Image (cartoon, rainbow, N blue to C red):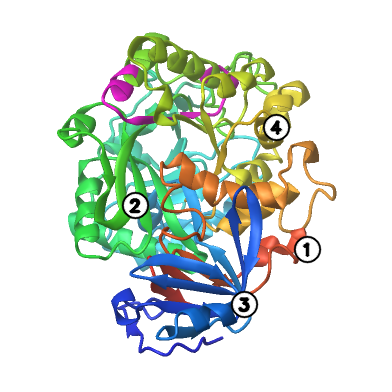
Amino acid sequence: MRFRVSVMAVACAATSILVVPAAMAAPTVVTNVQGYTLANNKLVSFSGLAFDKGKVLATGNNTALVKRYRAATLVDGEGKTMLPGLFDVHGHVFRLGFRRNEVLMGGTQNLDEALSKIRDYAKANPNRQWLLGSGWNQVIWKLGRFPTAVELDSAVADRPMTLRRVDGHATWANSKALQAAGITRDTPDPAGGRIERDAAGNPSGVLVDKAQLLVTNIIPAPSDDERRLALSTALAHFGSLGLTSVGDAGIGVDEARIYREFADQKKLTTRVYAMISDVGDDFRALNTKGPLKGYAQDRYNLRAVKLRGDGALGSRGAAMLEPYSDDHGNKGLLLSDDATMNSKVRIALKAGYQVNTHAIGDAANHQILNAYEAAYKDVGGRGLRNRIEHAQVVTPADIPRFKTLDLIASMQPTHATSDMNMAEDRIGKERLKGAYAWHTFLQQGTVVAGGSDFPVESANPFYGLHAAVTRTDHEGKPAQGWHPEEAMTLLQAFRAFTLDAAYAQHQEKVLGSLQRGKWADFILVDQDPFKAPAADLWKTQVLQTWVGGERVFRKE
């Protein structure tokens, strides 16, 4: 599908990326669309959008807009659906870029298929000294256990290889990698981590949570050129998915430097709301002038800190108040004791940063809620729109505290549909009452901001919208949705990925809806999500993506 534009497009290096500078066409009117946006807490429709110098002038009837702006450049939307640019408030941008150049285990149905894919990748990359991959899930493989180093050795034995689990909270290593890290039966489990062992006590090949650092800390660091390639790869992917703004949940000095470089060179084709990882050396280096707000015409922000409370449910690293239903001696892992977590929250809030803390298990959520409550009394910061990232399993008594503490629930709808095959096994029916509880949070007035946690999940926001509304997989299973009482309406889900996401990033005055004075970030898609069957939402294809009045993607 091609769209007729009365100005010449300037092609970028990637064939799927087109940038049309706003300065070439002031103002511009996009006509003949079925447009939707939020205004005054309601969904409004329009057939035309006018913008100038990258910002919205008006939405409304396209004929009236053409008459009002007689000198405008006209862009024919050919009857397609226009939406505000979509957000993903929680992902890992560089990790996504790197991962798209690694061996990916997502979609493999069993261990043999995964090992075959690994062998092929190793043969195709003979010069890589350390092989990397990700996306494995022993639950889908129906192993009933973690994979082993010996099994990975059968595919790659000549070089170190490590593969992150789909949730990022466990790493599968071959024997060469374990040897390079000096991991033996005498190596103790580090605080906040666990070395999986065989019956004889020898390392079996999987490292959980902070134990992963034993190998990841010795993997050669990427060069700046490799980081630039990763960022360019990720940005092109975002444009193709209709993501005009993403939150990067945990960066350091190196990533911040590349972001500033891309922003200064006008190459940041998706807006980035970055969070400094923890309050250690990187925080001290990046906090010399305080939070960075609205840099490069709101293309880049560095005004939040990302903390981590626990691991993930799939690897049983999520910290639970009571033992796992399928592992009675295990409650998961808190990554910090209460005093340390309280101190970290206070440091970040006192410096004026929004604090966004990863908490999946009910014990981690309880710890973080207590930390925010204590910090507000000590240093303030309640108005910084602090967030709990994931808020995945919360004891029902703690859910109202999100509202009383003015916290945002930053949640990932596809986590529910990915986890539904194992969540009840892990925590049982009773604890599911406070799990993936989007509707409960919304009903009490808590803002729910949408994301995916890419590359743990697909970055496609239409997958998130589909999961939020249906609570089914792409085959429509289970038929009535998994715990459908916690589903969102389509309007709630749309808001979570637009205006409420912008609010969660302190950007609702400039982004999140197509209203006068806001940036002209919008997408054109191939179906009307407000008229299409909910079961088909995930099939939506993005045809064009515009950021600040510049077209950054067109589907050929």
Q: Mark 4 points at which residue?
A: 443
Which residues fall within the magenta stretch? 346-364
Q: In this view, does 65 lie to the left or right of 439?
A: left
Numbered-mark total: 4
In front: mark 2 or mark 4?
A: 4
Q: Name the residue under label 1.
A: 533
Residue 192 found in image quarter? top left
Front residue of 92/31: it is 31
Residue contact at pointers 4 and 1, CB within 8 angstroms: no
| Residue 206 sits inside the magenta stretch | no
Q: How far apart are marks 4 and 3 (CA)?
A: 33 Å
Q: Is residue 475 left or right of residue 55?
A: right
Q: How far apart are marks 4 and 1 (CA)?
A: 25 Å
Q: Mark 3 packing: few (<14 Cα in 10 Å), some, or many (20+)?
A: many
Q: Give the mark nearest the N terminus, 1 or 3.
A: 3
Q: Mark 1 packing: few (<14 Cα in 10 Å), some, or many (20+)?
A: few
Q: Give the mark nearest the N terminus, 3 or 2.
A: 3
Residue 383 found in image quarter? top left
Q: Mark 4 packing: few (<14 Cα in 10 Å), some, or many (20+)?
A: few
Front residue of 162/364: it is 364
